[in-house]
């Protein structure tokens, strides 16, 4: 028999009841976020005006390793979880590698990506404290679609700022958010001061996640009974995404294997942390030898070429100062189609882990990511999101190394979402119209010099 | 707790090993297809030039109730099956109905619809007999995408004729097929005699499944070592789709319920038959009282307003004559966005069952289908394919009846696919730009008169 397929699904009762908070187990804790005015370490209360209270506490929690998933959120998780862990026999065959490649298929969530895991949690906590309206930003639209649906589930009104370049490249994601009943505005817009400021300076600016975050925070602060929600970067978002790795851990057990390498694509860090941290706890606690690889776009290389320093999470400087690997909050990323990875900084946990060499990072060019995405589509039948294709590309690199050495390494990556809304970018790739982007060290340094030392 | 969700997944070992052939259990067997030249009942051998041999025998098999699923096909099924059976608590709540609504979620297949179930089988049988190239038609592109991937799995080259109106309405499905490596041509095209003939008569003709079938058959006959494959209508296609209902039967048992009403949308009949026939066998064998409802578009109403007679399955008249409810193989359907339902006839099994009152049919207008689709999206988080929205609309009608009567009926429908590639049609619906289409009795009769009695 030439074709072989295998996937692992957990019985409902095995779906985790707790998220995993790696901060509690880290020997070197992340440095504290700073209040941008006082430059003093942030308290949870400082975040109350922006986020639901419970999320503020989760954000700064460095003591509890396990946070209980509220029953209503678990109930919604049951609707699409566990997501399958799949042995990628098709891809292995196409590569001719002795490696065992597994992927966690988050693309089967109703909205098509892992983003729903945190959207449901955030919308739930907002509803619980009586909030009626929520705002957010979105790049490619995966997060915006998730939040729009989660808002509908918990009876909230949602307003989404979508990065203009993605709004135009992927009009169907806007349609999805609107079908779920959300209000969608391309960012930068004239509806906020942050948007107006940048449009005045750069009238043709196509937007970035950093700018869209500023606009969404500003709208939340101007709207009664409204909170802001974020799709990645922050520690509480990554916390919610650990459901991915916790399930994968049990599913790898079903498969009788343990990963040598765990890979996630990297925008702000939540899907990477989600798949990695539950495995990393065995590295921290028991010295398990596993490599954790974040795959970022070469055109937005904060982990591989950015600098560790305090920086804002958004373009306008509305957020606390975060200790992160960053290209500068003023960084304008190239127009790659992996819109979800076009972000200047890395979350504080991942930044600390990278400093401590508990993980590594690789950068992937746009063309390599699409080549990997097409090979995966043809061999596994799923069109991957351009973001996820960065993880696939990194997995293929590792699998090809195994082909050279003959090693049967176990590689696990997170398929964070499908690319069915991104077909226009596949069209361009197949037509030879996509390009790579490069940055000089000077480009990067100039940008960082411009913002200077913000913690002083 | 306000939100509730429940889905049922079969353990891998419970995935059926056999398809169910309802022909064997039917008291009144379908009338035989006729050879178009001799008007004599068709033998399996007559179909050998067009289809893989095993499929020709499946097509005419009226004796074996259970057909074993080949191991290689089962292996591929394991990759995405069982698909979940979901209790649609969200929809029930939105409707305020006492009915218990379940849907079988075929949209989680890697290509996004149930079509893969038969595509894998057909591609497998072709490969087994040494075929190297396959052709097919596609409307909205769900079948074409499935076949393109299945061809890739079994190492075959695929050429797809896509109905021109859908090729233009849904360009991303073309991109998907191309990403899987298939050749895609809009139909009618100048590459076949059938295409040339209709373009000569009607230069602006936007195509139909009937015409695309003619073109695909012609190409298969002109190409060495090439077979044609079909996405619906024929009995062997429906046979493969019974995996849906067979799984659903076990999953309904897990839920401790049995459906009072089973609903599928209706194009040629394969997804409707797929979900219905396994349950219908208990009606035939044991007198179970279940209603089976086919939901067809009001603009293409072969079941509710067509005539039962011998007709061709394609526009040019290349197929055998089939005893079917039909609007005439020359029928040009309105440009509704449910491209997969734009077909003039119904499969021979369904046609016989409808004659025998073992099932019913309802017609759904385009606007009602989109209204239902949006309500489903908001309450269940899945954007349904416009085709599937016809089944949802019919389910909502039944659930609303239960609301009036207070009955807790159990309603099961097949969510045949997601609509992520169809967002342009949702945009148009939300903007108020979609319309209903109506046909007069005279329109229908005139068309049927034009073709006359083909069996004489």
Image (spheres, coloured by chain):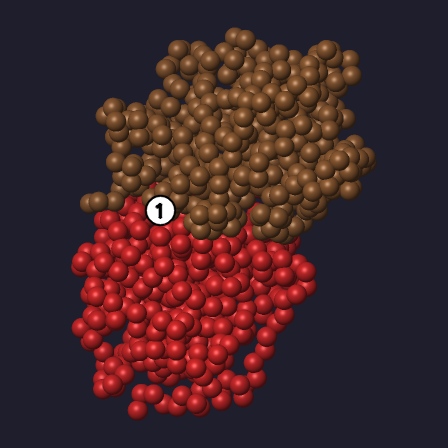
Chain colours: A brown, B red
Residue B450 at what x, y percent from top left?
Answer: 43, 90
Q: Residue at x 78, y 35 (%)?
A: A197
Return the residue found at the far top. Answer: A27
Q: Nearer the viewer, residue B76 or A356?
A: A356
Residue B13 at what x, y percent from top left?
Answer: 30, 42
Q: Residue at x 23, y 25 (%)?
A: A406
Residue B435 lies, with reference to residue B38, above or below; the image says above
Residue A10 at what x, y percent from top left?
Answer: 41, 34
A448 displayed left or right of B418: right
Q: Secondary structure at mark 1?
A: helix
Question: Is residue A97 at all visible to an observer of this figure?
Answer: yes
For label 1, the residue is A378
Q: Nearer the viewer, residue B33 or B280?
A: B33
Q: Quadrant of the N terminus of chain A?
A: top left
Q: Residue at x 32, y 30 (%)?
A: A399
Question: Is residue B415 at all visible to an observer of this figure?
Answer: no
Residue B258 in which image quadrant: bottom left
């Amino acid at each position: 028999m030439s074709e072989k397929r295998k996937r692992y699904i957990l019985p409902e009762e095995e779906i985790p009841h707790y998220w995993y908070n790696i901060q509690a187990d880290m020997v070197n804790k992340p440095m504290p976020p700073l209040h941008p005015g006082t430059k003093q370490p942030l308290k949870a209360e400082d975040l109350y005006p922006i986020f639901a209270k419970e999320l503020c506490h989760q954000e700064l929690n460095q003591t509890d390793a396990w946070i209980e998933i509220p029953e209503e959120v678990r109930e919604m998780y049951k609707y699409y979880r566990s997501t399958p862990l799949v042995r990628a026999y098709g891809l292995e065959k196409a590569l001719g590698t002795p490696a065992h490649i597994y992927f966690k298929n988050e693309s089967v969530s109703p909205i098509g990506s892992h983003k729903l895991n945190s959207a449901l949690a955030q919308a739930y906590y907002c509803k619980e404290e009586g909030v009626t309206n929520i705002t957010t930003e979105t790049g490619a639209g995966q997060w915006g679609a998730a939040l729009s649906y989660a808002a509908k589930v918990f009876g909230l009104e949602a307003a989404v700022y979508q990065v203009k370049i993605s709004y135009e490249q992927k009009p169907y994601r806007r349609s999805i958010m609107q079908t779920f009943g959300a209000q969608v505005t391309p960012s930068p817009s004239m509806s906020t001061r942050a948007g107006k400021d940048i449009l005045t300076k750069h009238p043709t600016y196509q937007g970035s996640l950093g700018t869209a975050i500023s606009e969404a925070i500003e709208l939340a602060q101007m709207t009664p009974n409204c909170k802001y929600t974020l799709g990645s970067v922050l520690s509480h978002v990554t916390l919610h995404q650990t459901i991915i790795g916790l399930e994968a851990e049990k599913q790898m057990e079903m498969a009788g294997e343990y990963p040598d390498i765990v890979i996630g694509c990297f925008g702000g860090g939540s899907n990477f942390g989600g798949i990695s941290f539950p495995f990393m706890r065995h590295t921290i606690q028991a010295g398990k030898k596993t490599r954790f690889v974040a795959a970022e776009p070469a055109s937005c290389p904060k982990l591989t070429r950015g600098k560790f320093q305090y920086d804002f999470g958004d373009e306008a400087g509305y957020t606390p100062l975060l200790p992160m690997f960053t290209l500068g909050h003023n960084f304008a990323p190239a127009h790659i189609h992996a819109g979800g990875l076009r972000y200047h900084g890395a979350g504080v946990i991942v930044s600390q882990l990278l400093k401590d060499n508990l993980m590594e990072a690789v950068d992937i060019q746009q063309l390599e990511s699409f080549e990997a995405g097409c090979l995966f589509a043809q061999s596994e039948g799923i069109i991957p999101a351009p973001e996820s294709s960065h993880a696939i590309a990194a997995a293929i690199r590792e699998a090809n190394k195994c082909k050279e050495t003959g090693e049967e390494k176990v590689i696990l990556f997170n398929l964070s979402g499908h690319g069915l809304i991104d077909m226009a970018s596949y069209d361009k790739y197949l037509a030879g119209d996509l390009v790579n982007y490069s940055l000089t060290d000077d480009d990067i340094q100039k940008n960082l010099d411009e913002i200077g030392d913000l913690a002083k």
